[in-house]
Amino acid sequence: MTKPDQKKEAFVFDKVQHCYSGVPALEKIDLKINEGEKIAIVGPSGSGKTTLLNMLNASIQPTNGRIEILGKDSNLYSPKELKALRSNISLIPQNLALVNSFRVWQNVITGSIGDYSFPKLIKNLFAPSEKKLLEIHSILERVGIEEKLYSVTSTLSGGQKQRVAVARSIFQSPSTILADEPVSSVDPARAASLVKILLKVAEEEEATLLMSLHNLDLAIKHFPRIIGIRNGNIHFDQSPDQISQRQLEELYELKESEILQDG
């Protein structure tokens, strides 16, 4: 019998493999993620972190194996159900996917693009209600850029654009937030601030959070669970206090053949 305080499984990977042109990006991944967990995913470039995140909202399907997303096999979602699923699972991609010619409030409103009919989308993008703008202003306050509500997105700094992407995710009201290297282009202080904001948002919204990071210090300092991925395999899946220095060194260790491949 399930205990009242026991979290449900949000995602289950069962021997999942994914290949690009026959080359494995992920190999036989077994993984369980419970609702409400806060997880950092670390590993060298090309290790499979982005592929794993994209599989969590069924943007990518496994070549072999099985993924269960929110209680259902990812291959069994209909196109209509996939649209609803991706509204419920917010993805902040590496490139942020913002429209630079839009004003900040317009980019935030695209977070719920999957919930609107085309006429309603056009209305919200170009003639929003005062109530809608107040809602967006409130969200921008939470990420610290409320004064940028009407700014053209192209005029913002890299850190401010990242906060717009976070605000868009909040507007989406997701059950899960996936963030792919969201702090890669800002200085350490701003990176730490943005990680804290995402963790606070996830806590307030009772959302699951998975964030891929290159910065090990941020992962170890702020996340209760860290998954290390190397060459498409899970190298470790532990709490920060359980991870040894040797495990971290092995995670990023380059073999001679890999160095030669990198030129």
Image (tube, rainbow, N blue to C red):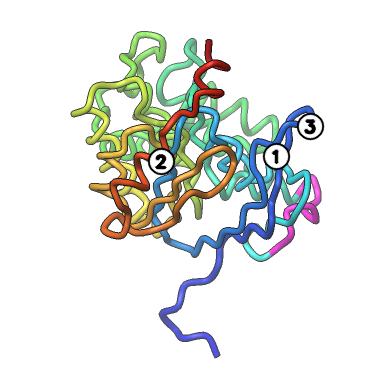
Q: What residue type is disc 1 on?
A: Ile
In this view, the residue farthest toward the left is 189
Do the CB atoms of the residues marked 1 and 2 lie less than 8 Å apart?
A: no
Q: Residue at x 56, y 42 (%)?
A: 53
Labels 1 and 3 touching (C-beta < 8 A): no
If you read the primary sequence from the N terminus, does the residue marked by circle 1 or circle 2 appear first?
Answer: 1
Magenta-drawn segment: 72-80
Say which of 34 and 205 sits in front.
Answer: 34
Name the spot of residue 233 as percent of width and height, x first.
57, 46
* Distance from Cα at disc 1 to Cα at disc 2: 28 Å
Disc 1 marks which residue?
60
What residue is at 31 percent from the left and 59 percent from the top?
242
Asked whether residue 129 is drawn in magenta, I would say no
Q: Residue furthest front?
A: 256
Residue at 23% x, 47% y is: 221
Q: Quadrant of the N terminus?
A: bottom right
Describe the element under mark 1 as helix, strand or loop: loop
When asked about the image quadrant of residue 219, the answer is top left
- Nearer mark to the viewer, of 1 and 2: 2
Quick one: which residue is furthest to the bottom in this view? 1
Q: Is residue 145 left or right of residue 127?
A: left
Q: Which corner quadrant of the image does residue 171 belong to?
A: top left
First in sequence: mark 2 vs mark 3: 3
Few, some or many C-alpha atoms within 10 Å of disc 2 (few <14, some 14-19, many ≥20)?
few
The residue at which mark 3 appears reads as 22
- Between marks 1 and 3 in the image, the one whose residue lies nearer the viewer: 3
Q: Nearer the viewer, residue 230 or 201?
A: 230
Residue at the disc numbered 2: 250
